[in-house]
Image (cartoon, rainbow, N blue to C red):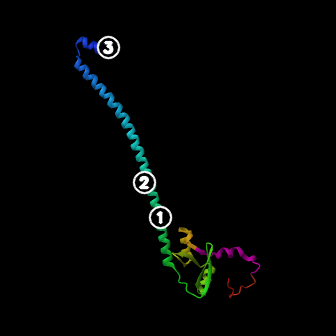
Amino acid sequence: MKNALQEQLLKAGLADEKKLKKVKKEKHVQRKQVGKRQAIVNEANLLAKEKQKEHVARDQELNRQRKAEADEKAIAAQVRQLIAVNRVAHKGEIAFNFADGTLVKRLHVSQKIHNELTQGKLAIARDGDGYALIPVPVANKIQERSPAEIVLLNDNQNNDNNVGEEDPYADYKIPDDLMW
């Protein structure tokens, strides 16, 4: 069935059959291509954009994980360096017992170091498989970065403040040779 306008143009002689078929064919091809392009282009664009968003999100997550790992390694290196630089030699004949988690460990130290440990002037930190004695200010820096590395940190300043002037045992002297 032909279009009424097309029939009128043919009768009037303004168009011939060849031109009519050619125009019909072009319109048909255009409709087919537009329909395919829009469906393919839209789906393809959506899939491509979605893939790219997933890829960006995955890359950001990987970068975040890598940065966290690098930060952990940097902190561990700082802690190792602080311990290595500020380590106090502790050879001696007196055994100093301390708790490492659920285990009781022992270090042999001199009397001077034993007193400093009990007074809270020195702390014990993990150093690889062993332990290291370090000054309290360094131990505080390490504890800010990695609290698990500090095994023993006596804080006797709080005990002094709590006792105050009303200490019932203030008149009694603790013997020097008393070992805990």
Distance from label 1 to label 2 (Cα)?
Answer: 18 Å
Instruction: Name the secondary structure under disc 2.
Output: helix
Amino acid, disc 1 = Asp
Mark closest to the chain's N terminus, 1 or 3: 3
Indicate whether residue 134 is drawn in magenta.
Answer: no
Instruction: Name the secondary structure under disc 1.
Output: helix
Kindly give the residue lying farthest to the front in the view shown: 1
The residue beneath circle 2 is 59
Amino acid, disc 2 = Asp
Mark closest to the chain's N terminus, 3 or 2: 3
Magenta span: 151-169
Q: Quadrant of residue 118?
A: bottom right
Residue beneath the point at 62% across and 82% down: 96
Amino acid, disc 3 = Ala
Left or right: where 66 falls relative to 23 = right
Residue beneath the point at 44% across and 52% down: 58
Distance from label 3 to label 2 (Cα)?
Answer: 62 Å
Q: Quadrant of residue 98?
A: bottom right
Instruction: Name the secondary structure under disc 3.
Output: helix
Indicate whether residue 162 is drawn in magenta.
Answer: yes
- Residue 119 percent across, percent down from the top left: 63, 80
The crowd level at tag 2 (other Cα within 10 Å; few <14, some 14-19, many 20+) is: few
- Residue 35 percent across, percent down from the top left: 36, 31
